[in-house]
């Protein structure tokens, strides 16, 4: 059953998908460099020993730059992998370990000995279609991140939304009771 919140989210998702698809590659690349610089300049980044990243889709900010520029030295890194309706986390040692999976995602391989939980991480970088200044986030609609992040201990893990400047909307996003708010948003 549709609700005003659901309808508002659906319309905003469609608009943001169009805007992301229409952003010129050169502009996305320059903005990605600015975003990465901002992330590594945060106190949370400097203090975090373990970081949960996401492998960006081609239209999202390019966090692979963190690997390419040696900004992950001394940190343990993990990525999420969608399994059914849940998201599980796995440590990796390099981008070459990620494998292409459904929906065009790059995800870590299933290795029980490398599994992690969200509270293992000082920082979780979170993708989204839209964000607001109050930490609201609009995801792609599957609820994977909301279910994962609902488990975290806010005292241990800082949630940082990552997006382009146009993804930060005026006002507040439509939010349902199960939607998780982020601690910070970094845009470029």
Image (cartoon, helix red, strand yellow):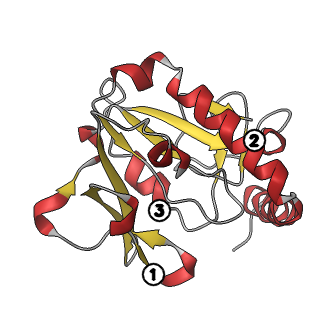
First in residue order: circle 2 vs circle 1: 2
Separation of marks 2 and 1 at Cα, in angstroms: 26 Å
Q: Residues within 10 Å of mark 1 (few under 14, many from 20)?
A: few
Establish if 114 lies above or below 173: below
In the rendered image, residue 163, in percent from the top left (x then y), is placed at 69, 44
SS under mark 1: loop
Determine whether, in the image, residue 73 is placed left or right of residue 63. Answer: left
Q: Which residue is mark 1?
A: 101
Instruction: Give the residue drawn at x 56%, y 80%.
Output: 103
Establish if 150 lies above or below 185: below
- Residue 179 visible here: no
SS under mark 2: helix
Determine whether, in the image, residue 149 is placed left or right of residue 178. Answer: left
Q: Which residue is mark 2?
A: 31
Q: Which residue is mark 3?
A: 144
Instruction: Give the residue drawn at x 40%, y 61%.
Output: 95
In the rendered image, residue 80, in percent from the top left (x then y), is placed at 38, 60
Q: Quadrant of residue 33?
A: top right
């Amino acid at each position: 059953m549709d609700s005003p919140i659901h309808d508002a989210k659906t319309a905003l998702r469609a608009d943001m998908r169009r805007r992301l698809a229409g952003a010129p590659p050169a502009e996305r690349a320059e903005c990605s460099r600015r975003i990465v610089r901002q992330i590594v300049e945060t106190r949370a980044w400097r203090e975090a020993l373990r970081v949960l990243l996401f492998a960006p889709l081609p239209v999202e900010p390019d966090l692979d730059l963190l690997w390419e520029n040696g900004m992950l030295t001394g940190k343990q890194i993990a990525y999420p992998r969608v399994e059914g309706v849940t998201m599980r986390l796995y440590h990796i040692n390099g981008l070459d370990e990620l494998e292409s999976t459904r929906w065009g995602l790059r995800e870590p391989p299933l290795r029980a000995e490398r599994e992690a939980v969200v509270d293992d991480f000082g920082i979780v970088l979170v993708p989204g279609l839209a964000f607001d200044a109050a930490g609201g986030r609009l995801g792609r609609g599957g609820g994977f991140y909301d279910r994962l992040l609902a488990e975290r201990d806010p005292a241990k893990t800082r949630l940082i939304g990552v997006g382009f400047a146009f993804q930060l909307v005026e006002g507040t996003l439509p939010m349902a009771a199960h939607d998780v708010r982020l601690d910070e948003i970094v845009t470029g």
